[in-house]
Amino acid sequence: MAEKLIEIKNLKQYFNVGRPNLVKAVDGVTFDIYKGETLGLVGESGCGKSTTGRTIIRLYDATAGEVFFDGENVHGKKSAKELKKFNRKMQMIFQDPYASLNPRMTVADIIAEGIDIHGLAKTRKERMERVYELLETVGLNKEHANRYPHEFSGGQRQRIGIARALAVEPEFIIADEPISALDVSIQAQVVNLMKKLQREKGLTYLFIAHDLSMVKYISDRIGVMYYGKLVEIAPAEDLYKNPLHPYTKSLLSAIPIPDPESERTRKRITYNPSVHNYGDNEDVTMREISPGHFVLCSAKEFEQYKQQYR
Amino acid sequence: MEISKEKFQIVGTRSTEAEKISKPSLSFWKDVSIRFRKNKLAMFGVVLLILLIIMAIFGPYMTKFDYRTNNLVNTNKPPGSMHWFGTDDLGRDVFARTWQGARISLFIGIAAAAVDFFIGVFWGGLAGYKGGRIDEFMMRFADVLWGIPYLLLVILFMVVMGQSLGTMILAMTITGWINMARIVRGQVLSLKSQEYVLASKTLGAGLQRIMGKHLIPNTMGPILVTMTLTVPSAIFTEAFLSYLGLGLTPPLASWGTMASDGLPAIKYYPWRLFFPATFICLTIFAFNVIGDGLRDALDPRLRK
């Protein structure tokens, strides 16, 4: 496969360390993201998907683990200059288009924030031209530059958020549930825009979502998270055809089918974590069942899954 | 009725048209000012305040009398064509003294609000943004200051540093900023986890930018309201302290010292108390209605 852009190694993010209400939001997650692909990250609410994304981009300081970008460790102590370089390579699109734009700033100032911070435009004119260009890229027009966020619809706001992220010409974008706050008719618009941008600019995405059908549509590979752990990661097609981890099976069984006949007979599988029944000295790690298809399992389960896999 | 196909014409759609916003663009502050101007009482407060400020600037020059010149022949004259507001026990013109006093009272009010603003926004903003142990330390320090009896502190300052305008403002602001700091801290605490602040962070923004461009502009509403309500309370405190004899030294006049001087003569020469007291009331009233109006205009939930 293509070269690795990002390697995440044993990433941990705990909150309230040293207090009784310790939360292990992300608990030892390891995966790679290849150049130019879209990796979907799914899981139920509160399973640590968003925290994983935010920790990768350093909004939180990781409790443990490493993140390599192009072979360079981007966590740990860094000088301000190195951090700025990193900020330009990795950007984020946020979930709530109503909260992610500062209500007191014009659209032009919002989009140009990255340009201003990194000094990417030498003159005012150059700055505005760049803003107009970005607005056009996301399907808005020049006249929108001097307006305020509250004048836009959710879909338009989300596109402004995308334009802001693109302003610093990143290679990698973390999309933190970018469509879950949008109308279904607008979701496709935003997802298609993201796909178009990926083709044109060779972007790499980490797409965090809980809408499984949308994730299947946009992703090349999909990772499934459960309680801060990555339980299965596989190419999208493979995961939908051959889900191995019981949690993945349960998750996939919850997708409604737009066909009344089969929908009536669709059986939902509930996941019970005690089915694993792991012993104390069993080594539960990610194991490769088939090329590119990893499952979190013990050695015993590994054999079972291999048999199951067709 | 049959409509034939030929009667239709394909116009097509233009995607740029679909995104067009026809509503005129309104910035946040324009919107606020429209709503503020609809509030009649608040507008009355603004007019009143402007009149008071104009009189404070030009009032002392409108009469030929000086606020500090004694005229022992003309003591305690009632208001008339010569002395419009009458004279006091040393024959000084009350009209001139009232507007001279207005300068000092308004100055004290505005200076106290300005000092509160700078210290309070800085302290509260930093505590709220940094959070954790720094926040804990900064706010506990403020709590300790808040716990010291206010009057005791003022008397202490007056005794140690002497009675002057500067001491008065210092004494008022030494604890006054805490209220502002608490309000700003609360706002910053809730705003700093907003996604637009996170977006700014991922773009590499530093503390200064996040504070100056994101957090403080979005806290400006509560800050403004607090400031407009600080002004009257400072004017009132000055009047109160002067009344206790802790205020300014003569011949300097403020509304508080004038009211204090006028009180013993209330039975025989009521105008000596009436004029300063009326203007204290009017000023406090004006600032209070402006503050209330601003709060209503800034509250997005009241947007119609």
Image (cartoon, coloured by chain):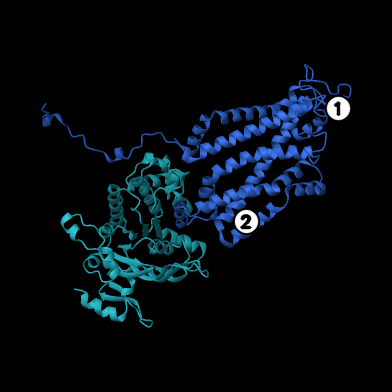
Near mark 2 (Cα within 10 A), the count class, few <14, some 14-19 or many ≥20, is many
Chain bearing mark 1? B
Q: Chain of mark 2?
A: B
Apparent colour of chain B: blue
Q: Earlier in the sequence, mark 1 or mark 2?
A: 1
Measured as percent of width and height from the top left, residue A280 is found at: 38, 81
Please, what is the three-letter code of the amino acid marked with disc 1?
Leu
Residue A217 sits in quarter: bottom left
Q: Residue at x 55, y 37 (%)?
A: B294
In the figure, is residue A263 to the left or right of B137? left
The chain drawn cyan is chain what? A
Residue located farthest toward the bottom when viewing the structure as drawn: A281
The local secondary structure at tag 2 comes to: helix
Using the image as rendered, state which of residue B83 and residue B300 is in the foreground: B300
- Residue A140, by quadrant, is top left
Percent across and percent down for residue B143 are: 66, 55
> Which residue was labeled with disc 2?
B139
Q: Specify few, some or many for label 1: CA neighbours under 10 Å numbering under 14, 14-19, or 20 or more.
A: some
At 18% from the left edge and 60% from the top edge, which residue is drawn? A265
The vertical placement of A26 against A124, above or below, is below
Contact flag, marks 1 and 2 (Cβ < 8 Å): no
Residue B233 visible somewhere in the drawing: yes
Point 37% across, 41% down: residue: A142
Q: Would you name the residue on which mark 1 appears?
A: B90
Q: Is residue A143 above or below residue B216?
A: above
